[in-house]
Image (cartoon, grey):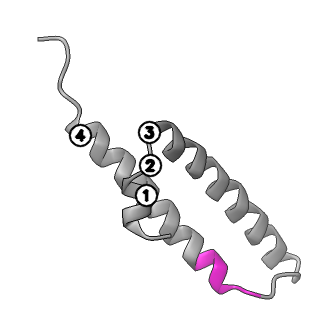
Amino acid sequence: MKYTEVHEMSPEELAQKEGEIRRELFNLKFRKATGQLDNTARIRNLKRDLARVLTSRKQRGAQAPAGGK
């Protein structure tokens, strides 16, 4: 997944994508521990995708106008 794809997602889509990536990452780590994982590079790619999603969410939070004053 490219950052441009992540950048175009809505906040709701980002939250959903984060959940999907976390679940898939957990499953891959579990399969790796049991010796059933063939493509270990997928774990690294998912970690990068998760970082992209989290970075985008954090940037959007920082860009939101400050309320209260």
Which kind of residue does numbered mark 2 sit on?
Answer: Met
Q: Residues within 10 Å of mark 4 (few under 14, many from 20)?
A: few
Which kind of residue does numbered mark 1 sit on?
Answer: Val
**Magenta stretch in the rendered image:** 39-44
**Do labels 1 and 3 touch, CB within 8 Å?**
no
Q: Which mark is residue 62?
A: 4
Q: Pointer 3: what residue? A: 11
Q: Quadrant of the C terminus?
A: top left
Q: Distance between the residues labelled 4 and 3?
A: 13 Å
- The residue lying toward the viewer, choosing from 26 and 67, is 67
**Do labels 1 and 2 touch, CB within 8 Å?**
yes
Seen at 59% across and 44% down, the residue is 16
Q: Pointer 1: what residue? A: 6
Magenta stretch: includes residue 42: yes
**Is residue 26 placed above or below 14 in the rendered structure?**
below
Quarter of the figure with residue 32: bottom right
Magenta stretch: includes residue 53: no
In the displayed structure image, the side of residue 26 where residue 15 appears, left or right? left
Seen at 65% across and 79% down, the residue is 42
**Could you say whether the residue bearing mark 4 is in a helix, strand or loop?**
helix
Mark 1 and mark 4 lie on one chain; the one further toward the N terminus is: 1
Q: Pointer 2: what residue? A: 9
Which dot, 4 or 3, sits closer to the camera? Answer: 3
Seen at 33% across and 46% down, the residue is 58
Q: Position of residue 29 (x, y in %)?
A: 74, 70
